[in-house]
Image: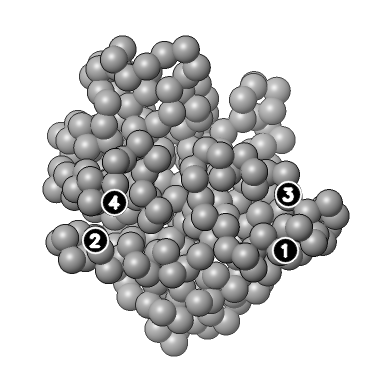
Amino acid sequence: MKIIDILKSGRPTLSYEVFPPKTDAAYEPLLENVREIATLHPDFMSVTYGAGGGTSEYTVAIADAIQMEFQVPALAHFTCVSSNRATIQAQLKKIKDAGIENVLALRGDLPEGTDWSQAEFKYASDLVEIIREAGDFCIGGACYPEGHTESANSREDIKNLKRKVDAGCQFLTTQMFFDNNILYNFLYKIREQGITVPVVAGIMPVTNGKQIARICKLSGTYLPARFKAIVDKFGDDPKAMTQAGIAYATDQIIDLIANGVNGIHVYSMNKPEVARQIQANLSHIVGPDAKTLC
């Protein structure tokens, strides 16, 4: 099933992101975690491509397992990094042969020691065009409510986003954010510029106090005082931080849905217990009962 059809249903949707293993030995244990998340029957699951495309061979295999075993629509990530037209077309053929209809087009992160001057494709909009030409895929893309770290300003960032949507991107998934007002302001700005495709809110339940410093360094994400207080108080207690992080993410999701943002994508970090608790917290908001009511 195509994700655009799911998002246009008018009801709240809940999906999860998982990522491939870095080694062959880690594949089976990780696949078990992915399967546990899939048993929750989310609206769809996305599978990342790995930094520098290094774990791309697992992306299709995991996405295929999600669809074949659990009938959960899969979204395969796809990046410009380490790709040329021939490798892109070959990977798209693998995706199509596996019956995967949904692709998330991303620029990706360069391997250390390389720069974009060496890349044949430098922008996600270029990738969107190739995917669109390759077949009847539903194409998603990323967006950055706080602005891409390499954009000069929000106006330039939204202009680039419009270019990506005009190229054929059918829906957008946001980078993580911890202040919902940032997303509401972003949505107002992009709608003003004619970007009308569905926007799925990317939510990160922070279960490890130490990971937040790395998150902020990579993405420049703003941390509200309320969230900082939670990390300061519970960051050194893994169980307390997990509980508090899930509660904060749940609160974000409830507020988003109450304000008309129906698409929710949880960055699960391959943790079934996190996905399970999030889903339990939302059982009457995003679930069989909610779907009947909506």
Residue at (70% x, 23% y) in the render = 25
Residue 56 visible here: no
Q: How far apart are marks 3 and 4 (CA)?
A: 30 Å
* Disc 2 versus disc 4: nearer the observer: 4
Q: Position of residue 130 (x, y in %)?
A: 19, 31
Q: Which amino acid does label 4 sit on?
A: Ser
Q: Badges 2 and 3: C-beta atoms under 8 Å apart? A: no
Secondary structure at badge 3 equals: loop
Q: Position of residue 49 (x, y in %)?
A: 46, 32
Crowding near the residue tagged with mark 1, few <14, some 14–19, many ≥20 C-alpha atoms within 10 Å:
some
Q: Which amino acid does label 3 sit on?
A: Asn
Q: Badges 3 and 4: C-beta atoms under 8 Å apart? A: no
Q: Work out whether mark 2 precedes mark 3 in sequence or the reverse, and give the earlier one.
A: 2
- Residue 190 - label: 2
Q: How far apart are marks 2 and 3 (CA)?
A: 33 Å
Q: Which amino acid does label 1 sit on?
A: Ile
Relative to 55, say whether 119 is above or below. Answer: above
Residue nearer the viewer, 172 or 47: 172
- Residue 230 - label: 1
Q: Work out whether mark 2 precedes mark 4 in sequence or the reverse, and give the earlier one.
A: 4
Q: Distance between the residues labelled 1 and 3?
A: 11 Å
Secondary structure at badge 1 equals: helix
Q: Work out whether mark 3 precedes mark 4 in sequence or the reverse, and give the earlier one.
A: 4
Crowding near the residue tagged with mark 3, few <14, some 14–19, many ≥20 C-alpha atoms within 10 Å:
some
Crowding near the residue tagged with mark 4, few <14, some 14–19, many ≥20 C-alpha atoms within 10 Å:
some
Q: Work out whether mark 4 precedes mark 1 in sequence or the reverse, and give the earlier one.
A: 4
Residue 208 visible here: yes
Residue designated by label 3: 208
Residue at (56% x, 39% y) in the render = 217
Q: Position of residue 150 (x, y in %)?
A: 35, 36
